[in-house]
Each structure stands twice: as structure tokens, then as C-alpha cells.
Image: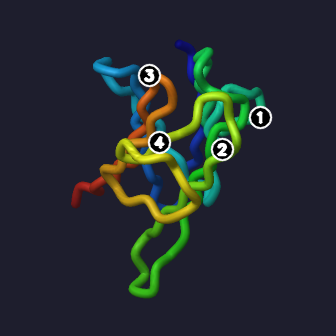
């Protein structure tokens, strides 16, 4: 399973952990406000897996009323639908710890804790 992800060094990145069911997760850090997850060459997080569509779902980062990061998921129509915490994915809020499942691929939104120096 090959994957590619890109990140830049500005702002507070968020991390998506990608794994096959029961496998060791690989973490990808993103700074941009929108991350397209899928198998297509234009995906920001490319997951080369037969069960993943070219455009599977979009994760968007925004700012809540108290300045906290907020995240939304927008699933796209796909042969294998996405699930969030074992329920069919719908457009809406996701929080750190939520598990997005597509076929036997798992993507977890993780909040990176910045260590004080």
C-alpha cells in the first residue's frame, strides 16, 4: 500500500493516521485547510488501495468560536462508502480520535500535542 502526503512548516499541523485494519499506522501531517483523501493523483493524502476511490472524502480545518481547531468531513459518492466511528459518513464535524473507515483502510484524526521547549 503506497501513500504520499505533503506538509509545510507553518501554522499548527494536524495529523491523519492511516493504517490497514490491525496494522501499524503511518502518520501524515498537514497544514493546509483542506485535505482530499483518495486514490487519485490529485489527492492530498493518496492511498493506493483498491478499496479507496479516487476522491473518497475531504477533511477541512476551521476555527471554532473559542479559537479552537474544528474539523469537518465531506464524503464523496464512492463504490466503497466511508464510515465514521462505524456509522455511514455524512457531511459534518469530526473530532480527534474519530475513525474514518473505507474498506479495510482506517484514517484517524489525531491532535498533535506540541511539546514545550
SS at badge 2 = strand
Q: Which residue is mark 4?
A: 83
Question: Is 53 in front, or is 25?
Answer: 53
In the image, is residue 73 above or below residue 79? below
From mark 4 to mark 1, how far is it between C-alphas?
Answer: 22 Å
Question: Is 110 in front, or is 83?
Answer: 83
Tell me residue 100's x, y (percent).
Answer: 44, 41
Please report the residue visible at 62 percent of the width from the left and 48 percent of the height from the top.
Answer: 75
Crowding around mark 1 (Cα neighbors within 10 Å: few <14, some 14 to 19, many 20+) is: few
Please report the residue visible at 64 percent of the width from the left and 55 percent of the height from the top.
Answer: 34
- Find out whether the residues at labels 2 and 4 contact each other: C-beta distance under 8 Å: no
**In the image, is 10 to the left or to the right of 42?**
left
The reply to whether residue 5 is visible in this rendering is no
**In the image, is 8 to the left or to the right of 14?**
right
The reply to whether residue 73 is visible in this rendering is yes
Q: Which residue is mark 3?
A: 104
**In the image, is 11 to the left or to the right of 15?**
right
Q: Which mark is residue 42?
A: 1
Amino acid at each position: 500500500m503506497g501513500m504520499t502526503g505533503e506538509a509545510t512548516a507553518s501554522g499548527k499541523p494536524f495529523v491523519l493516521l492511516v493504517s490497514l485494519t490491525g496494522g501499524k499506522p503511518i502518520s501524515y501531517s498537514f497544514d493546509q485547510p483542506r485535505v482530499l483523501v483518495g486514490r487519485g493523483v490529485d489527492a492530498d493524502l493518496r492511498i493506493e488501495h483498491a478499496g479507496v476511490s479516487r476522491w473518497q472524502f475531504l477533511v477541512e480545518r476551521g476555527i471554532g468560536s473559542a479559537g479552537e481547531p474544528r474539523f469537518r468531513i465531506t464524503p464523496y459518492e464512492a463504490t466503497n462508502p466511508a464510515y465514521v466511528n462505524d456509522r455511514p459518513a455524512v457531511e459534518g464535524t469530526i473530532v480527534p480520535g474519530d475513525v474514518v473507515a473505507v474498506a479495510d483502510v482506517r484514517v484517524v484524526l489525531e491532535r498533535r500535542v506540541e511539546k514545550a521547549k
